């Protein structure tokens, strides 16, 4: 096959605003721009980046929509906190559009958190085991307070994330957890779900304490499938 103008598409130049956004993201990722830091004034920043002010404004608007920066009317532009809660606004909107997305979210949690549980079983510390035991004990006394139970549940899962000692997986799992908050607000009030979750947590904890990776992964998968089944059954009722 030969290459000619007839069978290739014209090379498109990357929009300046997109390049600016990527530059700023790179500065944030490298630590040159830190959470909460104010960006230079518009005129100065445009000069530094060697771009027009309209292109800069377009880039900042895009980053603002993604939650990466916050634009304060008359008060400048600031790098956001960069935590999952503040960066997932657009994804929350996407998820809210279609219940099928919630099913996909559960499936993603099952895959990611099962893998994390396996890793955690090999690396978890005695102090983290003790913290998990305390949380399960707390959950037992919070059956009549779903909101506080949910908070303890979040701590339980995030302690396991930390035990895996994999920064990338921790970020992915934490982001999925943030997105799943709305579904937990529903399942927390379904009769029997909290008691079942305590039993599931006890099995996960047992596997972690035994340092049994396969058992821990299976226990986590079973737990999340139980929660998903309860949620879907409730939605279909």
Image (cartoon, grey):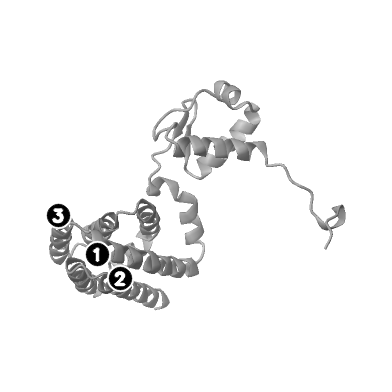
Question: Residue placed at 60% from the left, 22% from the top?
Answer: 47
Q: Could you say which quadrant of the image residue 174 lies in?
A: bottom left
Q: Which residue is mark 2?
A: 217
Locate residue 179, reporting x and y percent.
40, 58
> Which one is nearer the viewer's eye here, 217 or 108?
217
| Mark number, residue 121 | 1
Whether pointer 2 and pointer 1 mark residues with C-beta atoms closer than 8 Å, the reply is yes
Q: Which residue is mark 3?
A: 127
Dot 3 or dot 2, earlier in sequence? 3
> Which one is nearer the viewer's eye here, 129 or 138?
129
Disc 2 on helix, strand or loop?
helix
Locate residue 104, reporting x and y percent.
46, 68
Residue 61 in view, yes or no? no
Dot 2 or dot 1, earlier in sequence? 1
Q: Residues within 10 Å of mark 2 (few under 14, many from 20)?
A: many
Locate residue 133, reporting x and y percent.
14, 62
CA gap, disc 3 and disc 2: 20 Å
CA gap, disc 3 and disc 1: 13 Å
Question: Residue placed at 27% from the left, 73% from the top?
Answer: 219
Disc 3 on helix, strand or loop?
helix
Q: Is residue 139 above or below residue 72?
A: below
In this image, 83 relative to 101: left or right?
left
Residue 16 in view, yes or no? yes
Of the 4 image quadrants, the one containing the N terminus is bottom right
Of the 4 image quadrants, the one containing the C terminus is bottom left
Residue at the front extreme of this rendering? 1
Question: Which is in the foreground here, disc 3 or disc 1?
Answer: 1
In this image, 206 relative to 4: left or right?
left
Question: Which is in the foreground here, disc 2 or disc 1?
Answer: 1
Locate residue 50, reporting x and y percent.
63, 26
């Amino acid at each position: 096959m030969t290459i000619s103008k007839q069978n290739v598409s014209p090379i498109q130049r990357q929009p300046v605003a997109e390049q600016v956004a990527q530059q700023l993201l790179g500065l944030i990722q490298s630590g040159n721009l830190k959470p909460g830091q104010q960006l230079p004034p518009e005129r100065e920043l445009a000069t530094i980046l060697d771009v027009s002010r309209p292109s800069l404004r377009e880039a900042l608007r895009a980053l603002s929509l993604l939650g990466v920066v916050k634009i304060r009317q008359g008060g400048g532009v600031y790098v956001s906190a960069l935590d999952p809660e503040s960066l997932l606004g657009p994804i929350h909107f996407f998820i809210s559009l279609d219940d099928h997305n919630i099913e996909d979210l559960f499936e993603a949690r099952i895959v990611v958190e099962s893998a994390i549980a396996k890793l955690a079983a090999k690396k978890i510390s005695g102090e983290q085991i003790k913290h998990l035991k305390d949380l399960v004990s707390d959950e037992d006394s919070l059956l009549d307070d779903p909101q506080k139970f949910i908070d303890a549940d979040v701590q339980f899962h995030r302690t396991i994330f930390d035990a895996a000692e994999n920064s990338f997986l921790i970020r992915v799992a934490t982001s999925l957890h943030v997105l799943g908050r709305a579904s937990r607000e529903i399942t927390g009030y379904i009769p029997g779900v909290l008691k079942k979750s305590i039993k599931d947590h006890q099995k996960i904890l047992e596997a972690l304490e035994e340092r049994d990776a396969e058992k821990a992964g299976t226990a986590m998968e079973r737990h999340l499938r139980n929660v998903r089944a309860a949620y879907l059954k409730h939605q279909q009722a």
